[in-house]
Amino acid sequence: MAGRVLIVGSGPAGLASAIALTHAGLQCEIVEVSPPSRPAGIGIALQSAPLRAAKRLGIFKQLLEVGRPHHVIDMCRPDGTIVATVPQLNVNEPDDPRSSGWRARVCTR
Ligand SMILES: Cc1cc2nc3c(=O)[nH]c(=O)nc-3n(C[C@H](O)[C@H](O)[C@H](O)COP(=O)(O)OP(=O)(O)OC[C@H]3O[C@@H](n4cnc5c(N)ncnc54)[C@H](O)[C@@H]3O)c2cc1C
């Protein structure tokens, strides 16, 4: 496949589309209306299904190298007391992490 694609927006959908379309042989140009920004809060987390998508895009290993993989999510009070532990589903390989988090400063590398 050959051709050029204009992708409007550099959010997760735009960036993932650019990777997939580039792998398919298309030349992608991304336009973004907002200035570069970090994720709100302390960072972002991805659960098993988006991690599976990252695997298909060929970025799974690189993402995990800079992430904090985990199999459960602890729900905490502001003082850190754990009030619930939520197991995460796994739709990937049995040994793959069920979820992973990235600090905001890692997301802008
Ligand atoms: C506070 C907060 C925390 C979140 N945490 C998580 C999390 O931990 N894990 C998770 O999976 N999801 C999280 N989400 C949800 C996640 O951010 C969204 O699901 C995701 O950003 C959607 O991606 P998108 O690419 O569809 O849209 P967007 O991320 O909204 O990207 C669209 C982009 O298009 C640009 N754009 C729009 N119009 C134009 C135009 N006309 N020309 C050029 N550019 C344009 C916008 O500026 C934007 O950058 C969180 C959301 C919020 C608000």
Image (cartoon, grey):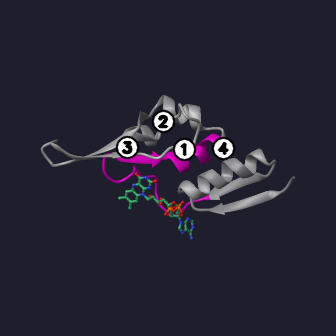
Q: Amino acid at mark 1?
A: Leu
According to the image, label 4 marks what residue? 57
**Amino acid under disc 4:** Leu
**Residue where numbered disc 3 is placed:** 104
Position in image of residue 34 (x %, y %): 48, 61
- Residue identified by numbered label 1: 51
- The image quadrant of residue 105 is top left
Q: Nearer the viewer, mark 1 or mark 4?
A: 1
Give the distance between the C-alpha atoms of the residues marked 3 and 1, in whole angstroms. Answer: 18 Å
Residues 28 and 76: in front is 76
**Is 58 included in the stretch rendered in magenta?**
no
- For the point 74% across and 47% down, which residue is it? 22
Q: Could you tell which of marks 2 and 4 lies nearer the N-terminus?
A: 4
- Give neighbour class at mark 2: few <14, some 14-19, many 20+ (Cα, 10 Å): many
Q: Identify the secondary structure beneath mark 2.
A: loop
User: Of callouts 2 and 1, which one flags the residue occurring earlier in the amino acid sequence?
Assistant: 1
Q: Choose between 5 and 103: the one closer to the eye.
A: 103
Q: Residue at x 62, y 40 (%)?
A: 55
102 sits left or right of 33 in the view? left
